[in-house]
């Protein structure tokens, strides 16, 4: 069993693990709660961790690991995601907030062991978002998660023990790794309370002592920056799940007073690199992480990985170990023999006056098809938007059709499933 300090459950038991109702919860109390819940769990191999409370999620996550079982992390919050999981794991019990509160009222137990589980144990199975197809299962050994959290703390936080307010769900890889696992294995402390609306986020930050960190997505960060009142001091804003614009990063640093760090990673490998987006376009890989080209494939490897992982992104290496993200392989399309980026077209479209949101995508798998667009732009017409694009991008890539919609079906991370886009395109057909 690996006993490296960042794999231990009860390292520094007096340090803060969470903040709930303005009460500080120590790591020792957390460890006892996890042991108590573990003692009350049935003998099952898999458990669906559906807890909405971040602290309850962490307790359930640790309790399942203490039983040498595996957390199943539904890719969405609705009942449909649970039913989908049950097709593959029909007997897996569901752990929710009500059940966790009941189990934690049991007789408090001192943890029987210092380590959460063995380093190689599959502590969780996460799932890709499904934005580019059917969600894929991603098994996560404890060492992979814990070491990624350890490197994240070193590279993003310069070793500081942050008090964290998060807007991202714990079941998503970004939230799991940077919120939950950094609390368990890297010493950051979780704010356990409402933190979705801008007013809730500001109130949460004001409740916490410094140093403070906000972990969020670019979509949510945009909503937060629309808040017209003064922002409390934030030492680090950590973001991922979609490209962050340099303009938004600079605005966030000006409003919040701290650095904005952007993570590069993927569900299959976790977080891999960071950049301070306001000042640089290059990402710096974590220590011990190697990203290189193998023929036409981009592959990432590290000592804590069970195996190398192929990346679905196009990267440009700068010769100093750093790289520039060009886009996902699926993002690059060819129309009439010309290559273009759906992300770049979307970015240009979203920059037009009056456009609140937009997405450009391919309606099918045919290379000869043109990209289409769904746009939220109150007060603008489709003809006006196409005319504005004509002078900014190659005419062959101007979306046809370009349809106006009242809202895009984004999830809590700002992602949209391809199936939802195609359904909305059909629904808006004249």
Image: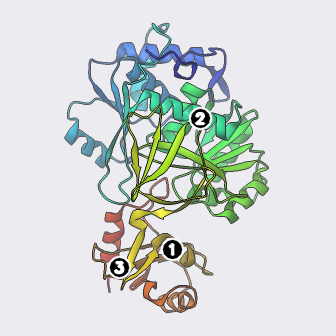
Quadrant occupied by the N terminus? top left
Q: Closer to us: mark 3 or mark 2?
A: 2
In the foreground, 255 or 365: 365
Percent of width and height locating residue 420 = 34, 65
Residue behind mark 1: 346
Check the image and report above or below for 351 versus 273: below
Check the image and report above or below for 34 versus 316: above
Q: Is residue 113 left or right of residue 426?
A: right
Q: Closer to us: mark 3 or mark 1?
A: 1
Task: Judge whether residue 227 can be spotted in this image.
Answer: no
Residue behind mark 3: 428
Crowd band around label 1 with a 10 angstrom C-alpha radius: few (<14), some (14–19), many (20+): some
Identify the element where label 2 is drawn.
Answer: helix
| Residue at image point 40% right, 22% down | 65
Percent of width and height locating residue 91 = 21, 30
Residue behind mark 2: 151
């Amino acid at each position: 069993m690996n006993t490296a300090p960042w794999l231990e459950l009860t390292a520094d038991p007096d340090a803060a693990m969470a903040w709930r109702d303005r009460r500080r919860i120590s790591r020792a109390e957390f460890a006892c709660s996890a042991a108590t819940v573990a003692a009350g769990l049935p003998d099952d191999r898999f458990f669906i961790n559906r807890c909405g409370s971040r602290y309850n999620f962490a307790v359930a996550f640790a309790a399942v690991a203490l039983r040498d079982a595996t957390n199943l992390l539904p890719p969405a919050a609705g009942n449909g995601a649970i039913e989908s999981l049950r097709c593959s794991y029909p007997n897996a019990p569901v752990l929710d907030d009500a059940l966790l509160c009941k189990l934690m009222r049991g007789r408090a137990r001192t943890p029987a062991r210092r380590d959460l589980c063995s380093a190689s144990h599959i502590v969780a199975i996460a799932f890709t978002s499904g934005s580019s197809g059917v969600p894929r299962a991603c098994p996560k050994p404890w060492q992979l998660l814990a070491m990624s959290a350890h490197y994240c703390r070193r590279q993003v936080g310069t070793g500081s023990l942050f008090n964290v307010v998060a807007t991202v769900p714990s079941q998503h890889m970004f939230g799991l790794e940077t919120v939950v696992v950094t609390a368990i294995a890297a010493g950051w402390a979780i704010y356990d309370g409402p933190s979705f609306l801008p007013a809730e986020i500001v109130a949460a930050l004001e409740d916490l002592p410094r140093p403070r960190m906000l972990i969020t997505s670019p979509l949510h960060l945009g909503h937060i920056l629309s808040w017209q009142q003064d922002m409390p001091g934030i030492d680090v804003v950590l973001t991922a799940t979609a490209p962050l614009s340099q303009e938004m990063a600079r605005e966030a640093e000006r409003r919040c007073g701290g650095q904005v760090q952007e993570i590069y990673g993927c569900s299959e490998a976790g977080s891999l690199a960071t950049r301070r987006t306001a000042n640089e376009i290059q990402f710096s890989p974590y220590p011990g992480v190697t990203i290189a080209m193998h023929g036409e494939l981009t592959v990432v490897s590290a000592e804590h990985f069970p195996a190398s992982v192929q990346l679905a992104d196009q990267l440009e290496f700068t010769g100093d170990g750093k790289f520039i993200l060009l886009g996902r392989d699926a993002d690059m399309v060819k129309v009439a023999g010309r290559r273009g980026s759906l992300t770049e077209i979307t970015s240009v479209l979203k920059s037009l006056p009056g456009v609140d949101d937009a997405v450009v995508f391919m309606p099918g798998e045919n290379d000869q098809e043109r990209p289409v667009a769904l746009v939220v732009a109150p007060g603008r017409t489709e003809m006006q938007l196409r005319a504005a694009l004509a002078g900014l991008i190659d005419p062959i890539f101007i979306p046809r059709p370009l349809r106006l919609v009242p809202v895009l079906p984004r999830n809590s991370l700002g992602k949209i499933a391809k199936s939802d886009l195609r359904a909305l395109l059909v629904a808006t057909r004249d």
